[in-house]
Image: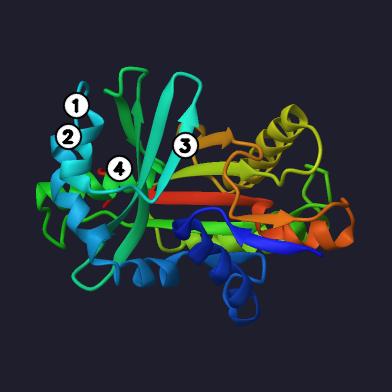
Amino acid sequence: MLKKLGVLPFIMLIGAYVSSALAESVDYDDAITSAAQFDQQLVQDQGAQDIVMFLSTIEQGLSKQDVDALLGTPYSVEHLNDGYRWEYNVSIPTSSNAFMGCQYRIEFDESNKVRSSDWRKSVCDLLYQQSTNGLDSAHQQKAEVFTLLSDVLFSFNQYHLSPNGIQALDRFIDNLLARYDSPVITVTGHTDVIGDAEANMSLSKLRAREVAKRFLLKGIEKDNVLVKGVGQTRPIVVCEGEQKDKALINCLAPNRRVEIEVYETPNAS
């Protein structure tokens, strides 16, 4: 029997939205979904909002006990070869009535001291700085995150965009760029766990590169398009199944994706 399990509460909400939004998408074709609904769901979590005010106090050398006292218990704990990684849900305001759901990661060394901390998405770092600096609405920068499902853009286990994928992606890019003056784009490729991990990492990078090329063809400057691949390391869902058959492939479909982060550069008019 095949069973789908959420890896993290944060990601599971996005996964649910990917599944439900496909039939409702009009402007961007069924390859594209926005994380907007998830962002509104996360704002219901008061703890995710309260964390924001304490993030500026996180610094190297703090103990686990110090961090726990400031931020509370993380929703995810990962064992590393030389320490631990804690991850938190954080809800950051993008306007007076809208929020973006973000992930904040803290790594501890073998002595259980903070070694580093960062945002999972670069857009979240931008929004956090904007929020803490108290910029008024006239100076706030646009920032959005979108998920493009790889099964619509590519053939299975291939990295060249399909003809239908090109059409869907171009429509999405045209619509997106019509709303931005000088955007910075980050393209991140993801795969499922089927196959070799190293090959999946390579595939994710190649797919991200192919998507990024379409932005360049639309006139975005090369320096404003960032590309990365993370392979199978950041799943939305985990599927239990003994055989790598069609059912497993379908179950893992949300993990095969390309994420697009976009935000307006400060010098935009």
Element under disc 3: strand
Instruction: Return the mark for residue 62.
Output: 1
With 221 as the anchor, is 267 left or right in this view? left
Q: Residue at x 37, y 18 (%)?
A: 110
Q: Along the horizontal axis of the image, is 3 left or right of 100?
A: right
Classify 10 Å Cα crowding around label 1: few (below 14), some (14-19), many (20 and above).
some
In the rendered structure, which disc, 4 or 2, sits on the residue that comes first in sequence?
Answer: 2
| Secondary structure type for disc 1 | loop
Q: Amino acid at mark 2?
A: Asp
Amino acid identity at mark 4: Asp
Tag on residue 125? Answer: 4
Q: What's under tag 1, amino acid-wise? A: Leu
- Name which residue lies at 19% across and 28% down: 59
Residue hosting label 3: 78
Real-space CA distance between mark 2 and mark 3, rounded to the nearest whole angstrom: 18 Å
| In this view, 71 is above or below 96 | above
Q: How many marks?
A: 4
Q: CA distance from mark 1 to mark 3?
A: 18 Å
Say which residue label 2 marks. 66
- Nearest to the eye among marks 4 and 2: give it: 2
The x and y percentages for residue 68 are: 22, 41
**Contact check, label 2 and label 1, Cβ < 8 Å:** yes
